[in-house]
Amino acid sequence: MFDIRRDKDLNSRSYIKNSTVSSVRWNTTRKLSISDCKIGNLLLGFGGGKKETITIEGIKNKSKIKNFNLETNDGGRLNIKNIRLHKRLGTDFWARDRAVTRKEVIFRNCDLSLVQTKFPPTKDKIRIFNLPDPGYIEEFNLSKHIKGIKMPFNYIIEDCKVSGIKIEFWGTKAVIEDSFVMFHCQGGDVQTVVRDCTVLNHFNYGSENISFENVVFRDSMKYLTCQAPGMKVGGVTMDEGGDFNDTFKNCHANLSYIVVAMKKGYLSGGIKFNEITMNNVHWEKGQITRKFPIRIIDKKGNPYSGKKIVINNKKVKTDKNGEVVIEFNFNKDNYNKSREVIIKTQEGKKMIKNVDFITDTPIILYLELDYPLNDQQSLFKPTNDYKEEIKGVDVKGKTIYYFDGGKEDSYFRNIVESDFKNIKGFNYQRLDNYNQYKKEADIIILSSRIPYNKVPQEVREKIGEKKYHSLFETYTLIEVENTHIFIVSY
């Protein structure tokens, strides 16, 4: 990697000729010429310098840049001649004290990787909203998607392909809504809410009080110590960090891995870890206390509310939703070991549940109604309250198949078996034969606990991943050809 920032002489000029370089970083205060080269990554850093407007046009990945010249008011120059860029153009906008970006940059007809956007500390909460999904962006102006702060910089994206927006908080307090964002956070008590978003690679460098509501996490989560302890940002000195607190509500984590390398922290609330296994959790140091909400359902499907129970030898009372909370400490020595939860009710019933660091929450436990169901077993339950119509669809006398989200999805099974008289059940792994089931069934019912990538393609074309994980109605109708699809959420 060639990083021109390492050259302390601002008046010097650097040259790269007839070379293959994995990565090159240029800053607007430096002078750099590149000619007849193959470049993997080209990162333009806009930290520091004077106010001005810069336009960057026509830089695309896997293409040859014949002639590109840029001069800044800071005396910086970038001259490019006959280079082949193999990846998208990288960008970096700073808000820290010695490198505050004071420029407006217009990107036009370019291929951009994640646009790195660093925010300074704030006293009150700012609002960030409607950051774009990856892909083609016709027009995006950052300043129109932020309220509550006057940023020292701005960027405008026109007619570009973009990998997304990367947000870094340095002691920033904020609400982020309706966005696709890579989210990194450091700097004490940030009191931040992330709502109705897709979050790519969530990194927490010791920030407290972050709440996630209706969020889909992708790729990775990392809990780390502060990147730059002692650095001053907006007049605030970043401490070492390492203590954090993340709270989840109706969240889903579609992750490849989790990394823990910090001091201590807390995870609480409702989150589903889809497909990741303990083999993909990498624990270097630190302790995390995870709080597990447990919801108890009685044999009629109602919350077991306001009841005295004993949970792991401790007397507690369920709330109005039939919930209690139990917590366990995880560290490098025991993070991959399961823990046993034993609950005894006032009626003398006993329930046992094993949990580990990535157990889905809330945990649903049932009194006297866990009906084991083998593939293709039909249940005919005596009741006088079967449904005849749902969402305007006549279900009486129809052939109905349902697909659960796995052996622990018994609450879903209880819902559909109570609502329909003749119904046949399958595990979601059987959806490989979806086209055959469509020919056999008038109605197909899917559990929202089925991993999104296992949902049939034609259903995914009707409902995006973020919406799929944010359904709040018990039955959501999806219209497809030749059958009715219902998604059951709870």
Image (tube, grey):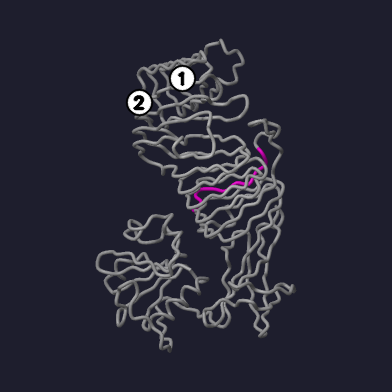
Residue under numbered circle 1: 19
**Residue 225: horizontal and vertical position, in percent?**
67, 41
What residue do we see at 55% from left, 59% from top?
249
Precedes in sequence: disc 1 or disc 2: 1
What residue do we see at 45% from left, 59% from top?
469
Q: Which mark is residue 58?
A: 2
Question: For the residue carrying disc 2, how many other residues have a C-alpha within 10 Å: few (<14), some (14-19), or many (20+)?
Answer: some
**Residue 210: horizontal and vertical position, in percent?**
60, 50
| On screen, residue 398 above or below 132 | below
Q: In this view, does 231 lie to the left or right of 54?
A: right
Q: Is residue 431 left or right of residue 210?
A: left
Question: For the residue labelled by badge 2, is the local secondary structure a helix, a strand or a loop?
Answer: loop
What residue do we see at 44% from left, 37% from top?
144
| On screen, residue 423 above or below 437 | below
Residue 101 is inside the magenta segment:
no
**Residue 95: horizontal and vertical position, in percent?**
57, 30
- Where residue 393 sits, quadrant-wise, is bottom left
* Marks 1 and 2 close (CB-CB < 8 Å): no
| On screen, residue 388 above or below 197 | below
Q: Nearer the viewer, mark 1 or mark 2?
A: 2
**Residue 357: horizontal and vertical position, in percent?**
63, 59
How far apart marks 1 and 2 lie (CA) works out to 22 Å
Q: Quadrant where the N terminus lies? A: top right
* Highlighted magenta segment, given as a residue range: 216-226
The amino acid at mark 2 is Gly
Residue 217 is inside the magenta segment:
yes
The amino acid at mark 1 is Ser
- Where residue 381 sits, quadrant-wise, is bottom left
Question: For the residue labelled by badge 1, is the local secondary structure a helix, a strand or a loop?
Answer: loop
| Front residue of 454 and 476 | 476
| Front residue of 369 and 47 | 47
